[in-house]
Amino acid sequence: MQLEITLHEQIHNAIKESGLFPLTTCSYQTIYNGLLSTFAGRWHTETNTFHLSVGEMMVTLDDVTYLLDILITGAFYNCEHMDKEAAISVLVEILGVGY
């Protein structure tokens, strides 16, 4: 008899397999709120870029690789569609962030 894996377990396993699991120990509370607010205010969703006084800046996968020392390899992870509340619940549980 094979046990059914829950969506939470699937996501948890995918994070472990991706090599991103150490990032789950980072806490939202350790982020400097002033800096986060400044970047959020300069984000433009139309172009997916930050508009800074020195010009426009786009964060690429190469930037993520360099900054976090994480290789970007393999296929994209596809999971079942879930509504906003279910996604929030899973993220809160996995990342330990209050909502």
Image (cartoon, helix red, strand yellow):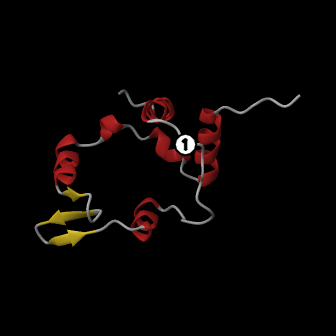
> Between 25 and 5, which is closer to the camera in this rendering?
5
Residue 74 in percent (x, y) is at 63, 64
Q: On the rendered structure, is 86 left or right of 27?
A: right
> Image quarter for residue 53?
bottom left
Residue 7 in percent (x, y) is at 62, 35
| Residue at image coords 55%, 45% | 21
Instruction: Answer few, some or many: residues within 10 Å of disc 1's Cα (few below 14, many 20 plus, some between 14 and 19).
Output: few
| Residue at image coords 20%, 70% | 56
> Which element type, helix, strand or loop, lies under badge 1?
loop
Q: On the rendered structure, is 27 left or right of 33?
A: right
Residue 99 in percent (x, y) is at 35, 27
Please give the count of numbered marks on the rendered protein: 1
Q: In which quarter of the image is the N terminus?
A: top right
Amino acid under disc 1: His
- Against 58, residue 94 (above or below) is above
Q: According to the image, label 1 marks what residue? A: 81
> Image quarter for residue 60?
bottom left
> Between 39 and 5, which is closer to the camera in this rendering?
5
Residue 39 in percent (x, y) is at 21, 53
Residue ranking furthest to the right: 1
> Between 94 and 45, which is closer to the camera in this rendering?
45
| Residue at image coords 54%, 65% | 72
| Residue at image coords 84%, 31% | 2
Q: On the rendered structure, is 24 left or right of 29?
A: right
